[in-house]
Amino acid sequence: MDISYRGEVRSQVSFPKALKWKKRMPYIVAYGVLFITTLPVILMYLWLLLNSFSSQMKYGFIPVNFTLDNWRFLWTNVEIAGSVYPSIWLATWNSLVFAGVLTILEVIIGVMAGFALSRLRFPGRHGLLKITLILHAFPSIALLIAVFYILNFLGLFDTLWGVVLVKTALQIPLTAWIIKGFFDDVPWDVEWAGLIDGCNRFKVWYSIILPLVKPGIAAVCIFSFLSGWSEFLLLYTFIISDSNITLATYLQKLLSDPNLVPYGLLTAVSVFYMLPVIVFFILTQKSLMHMHAGGGKGV
């Protein structure tokens, strides 16, 4: 075979390979950057998990002496320096009740408010839409004194239900705004078709429009639950009795005395605190992946 011909064949074979690597290069760079930025977070959670099953960490990151003593809170009440801590299962139940009731109230009120803001034309609507975002911008800590007086007057201080109402009121403005965007994406023709077929306004809303905004409702449910599950400031401020303790305030109790912090126990409780969120995310990730941002076609 002629040498020039063999060189031409070799160049034709190598050219597709070079082209293939050139196409893959953006993906390689993107995944490389993603790996580098997420590696510290992954190592942090891995350290947390390993530390929860060891009595000490050699050099700060090598676990030694496997033990389940850090997880003793699962079968008995923790006692540190003579102080007996509440049951972790009571704290877990209170956290589930708080997050669940918050999600139900926020979704019901937010969906109805979002529909009204999207479909109804009433005086002051534009101003109300702007105020909803302004209200959500207020930090919770700026309202603590006023909220304390209100809860104390209503007899809801040191109750989960009182904090649920406060958290719901703070979350509804943004929830209504998000849901409004999804309702804006539903064509008016769909609603008019239902009315022409003899349905009343409520039946059109419940039977026709709501199924079309399920991705938005699912997203709001997920974010509402996670917000309630991770809430700390309001619960720490307005809950003082151990009977209403949640997992967030349980962790704070373990950190209350810096000189007696049981770090192994603290990491185990932290891992336990994350487990429901991980399970919840696994069960709801399809809804998150299919979610698109609400349109907001205009105010």
Image: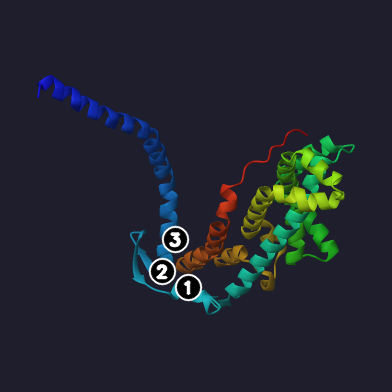
At x 77% / y 53%, what residue is drawn?
207
Residue 255 seen in the figure: no
Question: Does the residue at mark 1 contact the one at mark 2 (Cβ under 8 Å)?
Answer: yes
Q: CA distance from mark 1 to mark 2?
A: 8 Å
- Which quarter of the figure is the N terminus placed in? top left
Q: Nearer the viewer, residue 228 or 248?
A: 228
Which of disc 3 and disc 1 is earlier in sequence? 3
Crowding at dot 2, Cα within 10 Å, few <14 / some 14-19 / many 20+, comes out as: many
The type of residue carrying mark 1 is Trp
Q: Nearer the viewer, residue 55 or 25?
A: 25
Which of disc 2 and disc 3 is earlier in sequence? 3
The type of residue carrying mark 2 is Phe
Residue 8 rendering spot, x and y as whole percentages: 19, 22
Residue 105 rendering spot, x and y as whole percentages: 75, 58
Which residue position holds label 3?
48
- Disc marking residue 53: 2
- Disc marking residue 45: none
Which residue position holds label 1?
71
Q: Is residue 123 left or right of residue 45?
A: right
The type of residue carrying mark 3 is Leu
